[in-house]
Amino acid sequence: MALGFGCVDFRQGSVEVRGVAVDPAKFIREVRAEVGRVTWPTRKETLVTTGLVFAMVTITALFFFFVDQIISLGVRALFGVGG
C-alpha cells in the first residue's frame, strides 16, 4: 500500500518511510543495548551534584537580589522616586 510519504508492509513487520526501513523490534533491541552502555551516576554523585546545583542557585539568587537593590537605590537617588 503506497502512501504519499512511505509505505507499510505488515507481512514483514517493518515500515518504510521516505526510503528508510524502520523495524520496531530492531529499534527496541538497539535502545536496550544503548541503555546498557550508559554510565549511570552513583547515589552519592547524584546527591553531591544536586547539592551543588542548589548552592549555585542560592548564590545566583542572592547576587541578583543585591544587584537589584543597588540599581534600585541608584534609580531612586537619580530620579527621587519611590519610598
Image: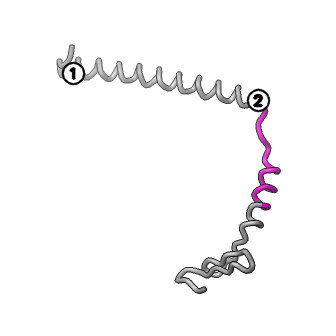
Mark 1 Cα shell of 10 Å, populated few (<14), some (14-19), many (≥20): few
Disc 2 from disc 1: Cα separation: 52 Å
Apparent side of residue 7 relative to residue 83 in the rendered image (left or right): right
Residue 33 part of the magenta segment = yes
| Label disc, if present, on residue 14 of the rendered structure | none
Stretch of the chain drawn in magenta = 29-45
**Percent x, y for residue 49?**
68, 30
Task: Identify which residue is drawn at 21% across, 13% down.
Answer: 83
The mark lying in front, picked from 2 and 1, is 2
Along the line of sight, which residue is nearer the eye, 58 or 7? 7
**Percent x, y for residue 45?**
75, 30
Q: Magenta span: helix, strand or loop, mainly? A: helix
The amino acid marked with disc number 1 is: Leu
Task: Identify which residue is drawn at 65% across, 78% down.
Answer: 16
| Nearer-N-terminus badge (2/1) | 2
Apparent side of residue 81 relative to residue 53 in the rendered image (left or right): left
Residue 39 vs 63, above or below: the answer is below
Location of residue 19 (image quadrant):
bottom right
Do the numbered discs 2 and 1 sit on residues whose CB atoms are within 8 Å?
Answer: no
Along the line of sight, which residue is nearer the eye, 47 or 14? 14
Task: State the residue position of label 2.
Answer: 43
Numbered circles on residues, count: 2
**Percent x, y for residue 82?**
20, 17
Q: Which element carries disc 1, helix, strand or loop?
A: helix
Image quarter hosting the N terminus: bottom right
Task: State the residue position of label 1.
Answer: 78
Task: Identify which residue is drawn at 43% across, 25% down.
Answer: 64
Task: Identify which residue is drawn at 75% across, 57% down.
Answer: 31
**Percent x, y for residue 20?**
67, 77
Query: Which residue lies most toward the left here?
Result: 80
Residue 64 part of the magenta segment = no
Q: Which element carries disc 2, helix, strand or loop?
A: helix
